Image (cartoon, helix red, strand yellow):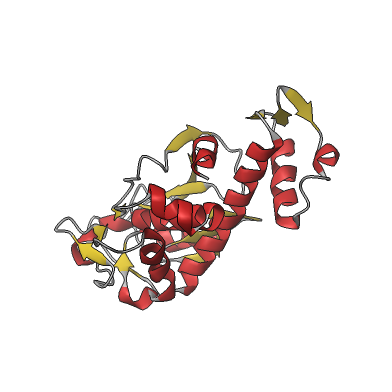
Amino acid sequence: MISLNSQIVKPEELSKDITSTEQKVIIKQMVSYPMIYHYESIQQLKFELLFRVNTVKAATALDKSGAKFTTFAYSFPNRKYWYRLPNGGFLLREGVNPSEGIEDIVKNGELYAFECATAIAIVLYIAVLYTIGPRAFNTYFRRLYLMDWQFDEDLPVYQKDGEDFLIGDVLHFKNPDFDPRQPWWRAENAIFFGNDKFYGHGIGIRDSKAIINFLNGKRKENADESAYLMRMITRPNYKIISLLR
């Protein structure tokens, strides 16, 4: 359910303000769940819907970019825009506009390699850029640092337990019997596209069965527990990010 200014609203009451077909699908998802999604204004709701659609666009762009999957030990960026730090993270070079640095990852993906948690961060930063535009992005994200689950304070994220999966959510597949020789396949972080489609860096855009089968192929000998989709959701704090514009 959706609450606007403390009032529960029906999808048809939003039709004048929400005209995008993609955004209407997310509205339909929201009203199908028993929990209440609270918004102070229609603008706040519209910002989240736009951000969620842009998250899918960003994930699609990264999937098509040619960026490779690797571990922190072997990660590399385009050194024109990024320093590679000893821990495998990427730090934006001085004098580089953050919008140019983050966009280069999808424009010249073959010059980059990183693991799946950093890929999720990249997707979310690109989604922020698509949503608030380069001027605001360059103001708030001056020294971007890409490493695992570390985010700039202006891109706060949180985790919650549940199964109210919405398009644009970050979801998590766990592989409890992973091969210890390939510990990076202990899990896969993925962007939810809806209709049982997910983007996971190193796996691509696949349905849940294909991702689980892939992870099951990365288990130790005599494994008896299958990989599975967790009841955990990671989301940006859309309300706070909406103040950056």
Q: Nearer the viewer, residue 222 or 57?
A: 57
Q: Is residue 111 above or below residue 54?
A: below
In the displayed structure, does residue 201 sit left or right of residue 165?
left
Q: Is residue 5 above or below residue 191?
A: above
Where does the image place residue 178, in percent across and percent down from the top left?
A: 32, 54
User: Is residue 142 at all visible to an observer of this figure?
Assistant: yes
- Number of numbered discs: 0
In the displayed structure, does residue 98 sit left or right of residue 192?
left
Task: Examine the image and state in which quarter residue 94 appears.
Answer: bottom left
Q: Nearer the viewer, residue 14 or 222?
A: 14
Q: Nearer the viewer, residue 177 or 3?
A: 3
Farthest residue, direction right: 12
Say which residue appears at 63% left-offset and 37% top-offset.
44
Where does the image place residue 206, in percent across and percent down from the top left?
A: 54, 64
Say which residue appears at 65% left-offset and 28% top-offset.
40
User: Is residue 232 at all visible to an observer of this figure?
Assistant: no
Where does the image place residue 200, in percent across and percent down from the top left?
A: 46, 60
Task: Examine the image and state in which quarter residue 42 appears.
Answer: top right
Farthest residue, direction left: 86
Farthest residue, direction top: 6
Which corner quadrant holds the N terminus?
Answer: top right
In the displayed structure, does residue 183 sit left or right of residue 40?
left
Say which residue appears at 24% left-offset and 57% top-offset.
89
Where does the image place residue 184, in percent across and percent down from the top left?
A: 29, 57
Q: Nearer the viewer, residue 186 or 179?
A: 186
Say which residue appears at 24% left-offset and 71% top-offset.
79
